[in-house]
Amino acid sequence: MERMYLEDFAAGQVFRSGPYAVTEAEILDYARRWDPQPFHLDDAAAKATPFGGLAASGWHTAAMTMRLIVESFPPAWGVIGGRMEMLEWPRPVRPGDVLRVETEVLEVKPSRSKPGQGMLRVRCTTLNQKDEPVQVIVPNIIVPRRAG
């Protein structure tokens, strides 16, 4: 994937990731290590919660999303966040879900104080196999400008 500079981006551009299949084993492993709540660790316990069954941690969803963004969105310095405007998880990620991310450029802003860079305001929507959003984030990404 060819790296892009601030001048290469325009509002309305959309970048799409490939698919990622989520396994029960990885949901359990992540939960044991980083978010050991019953609805992330045990399907039977999760049935008694608003999730109604085993669900990936939202932070696990964020980590999977990050991987898909890095693989499909090409700012020259990489995906370096400046400020997060929004993060929401409208529905849970389940074992067997197949995720993909659509990253839409909302705004391109050259920096006034740092002429060698600017910011991209983007919306990254993580979708499951039913095209239902499971996570939506709106970060501002620091992107270099072309030299010269």
Image (cartoon, grey):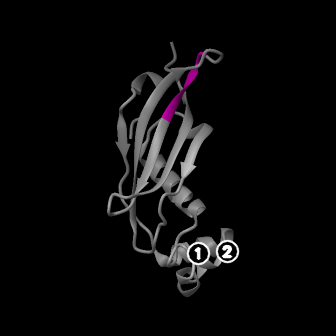
Q: Which residue occupies 46% across, 45% down? A: 124
59 vs 14, left or right, is right
Q: In this view, does 118 lie above or below 96?
A: above
The image quarter in which residue 11 lies: top left
Number of numbered tags placed on the structure image: 2
Q: Which residue occupies 38% across, 61% down? A: 128
- The quarter of the picture where the N terminus appears is top left
| Range drawn in magenta | 115-121
Foreground of the two, 64 or 132 = 132
Tell which residue pokes out farthest to the left in this image: 130
| Image x and y of residue 23, in percent | 46, 74
Tell which residue pokes out farthest to the bottom in this image: 44
| Residue 50 counted in the magenta span | no
| Image x and y of residue 49, in percent | 57, 77
Q: Can residue 3 be seen in this view?
A: no
Q: In this view, does 35 lie above or below 73?
A: below
Q: In this view, does 62 lie above or below 16?
A: below
Tell which residue pokes out farthest to the top in this image: 148
How many residues crowd mark 2 within 10 Å: few (<14), some (14–19), many (20+)? some
Check disc 1 and report the residue beneath it.
40
Q: Do the residues labelled 2 and 1 touch (CB within 8 Å)?
A: yes
Check disc 2 and report the residue beneath it.
36
Q: Is residue 131 above or below residue 112?
A: below
